[in-house]
Amino acid sequence: MPKEIQKPTRRKAHFYWWTLANTVAACVAVLSWVLTLHVFGHPEIPRYHRIIERLGLAKPPPGFQLQDAPAGESADPRALYRRYAALDGAALQRLNRALLRNYLTGLGEANLIQYIEGDLEIIRTRELQPGDLFPKGFAVRARAMVQPDEFSEPAPWPVIIDYLFPTPEESARSWFRAGDRLKVSKVPNCAMVLNVAREIEGDTPRVVITAVPIVMSEYLVGESQKFKLATPDRADPSATLPVFDPEPQAPES
């Protein structure tokens, strides 16, 4: 008897569409997961930060008590200049994005925490407004003063510090007068580098550093005047840094 040949059975059409739908759904899930990680991993990008804020998941800027402040290196104006003066535009951009990302995510990367120290001479001040990094408080621009040796008077160093003070007591800005001196140290100030810019002054590169305090305590001005630092409600990564316009160049003689 001849052997009966079985014809292959056709797969039902709905099996194809079911497989396709599941493949597309899996791809969408993986893509969403990757995009979510990318968005939440880069809050320093303004459009991503706005998404995180709309979801109610943005972290407030860090604010510590002195005993809880994270460890970090400290550097005086000489060390700051050596570290940053030679960086080109691309390197500065990468550094600034990393510094802002670390700040907005709670300072988990200790190697990116750099505290400033040194003697500063105040140049000018201005009030912070919506559109700045912090919507309330004020900023003080000061030049670093360095004593070349024990026999010389302190002289200007090519390092400018823009010190941002988040505070509801904006009237304290009047206590910082041009020509006055500030002494900044890791303890108790804990003012960390948040942004680095580079300007050319004549033939000498000048480093402009934006510094923000991460310890929220009373700040002493002079011998007796004090005001309270307060953790900002939010930080705006789209704000322009530095917060001051470039210093006018001295005319050539």
Image: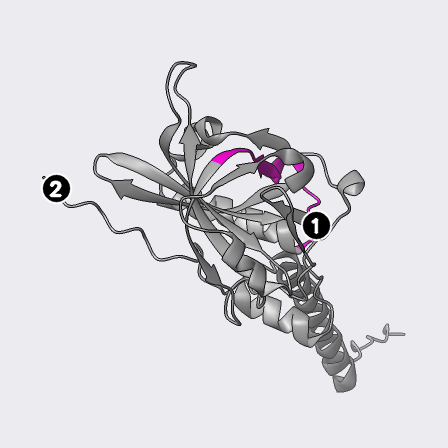
Residue 71 at x, y percent in the picture: 71, 34
Q: Is the residue 100 above or below the residue 126 in the image?
A: above
Residue name at image x 32 percent, y 53 percent: 246
| Res 190 quadrant in image | top right
Q: Nearer the viewer, mark 1 or mark 2?
A: 1
Residue 191 at x, y percent in the picture: 60, 43
Residue 16 at x, y percent in the picture: 73, 79
Separation (CA) of disc 1 from disc 2: 43 Å
What residue range appears in magenta?
105-119
Q: Is the residue 183 above or below the residue 213 in the image?
A: above
Residue named by callout 1: 218
Q: Is residue 12 visible?
A: no
* Label 2 environment density (alpha carbons within 10 Å; few <14, some 14–19, many ≥20): few
Extreme-right residue of the structure: 1
- Residue 134 is labelled as none
Q: Indicate the colouring scheme.
A: one colour
Query: Which callout, 1 or 2, points at the residue further toward the start of the chain?
Result: 1
Q: Is residue 221 magenta?
A: no
Q: Is residue 29 visible?
A: yes
Q: Quadrant of the N terminus?
A: bottom right
| Res 105 quadrant in image | bottom right
Left or right: residue 125 versus residue 130 is left
Residue named by callout 2: 252
Residue name at image x 83 percent, y 76 percent: 6
Q: Is the residue 82 above or below the residue 248 in the image?
A: above
Mark 2 belongs to which amino acid? Glu
Left or right: residue 64 versus residue 176 is right
Mark 1 belongs to which amino acid? Glu
Q: How many marks?
A: 2
* Label 1 environment density (alpha carbons within 10 Å; few <14, some 14–19, many ≥20): some
Extreme-left residue of the structure: 253
Left or right: residue 65 versus residue 3 is left
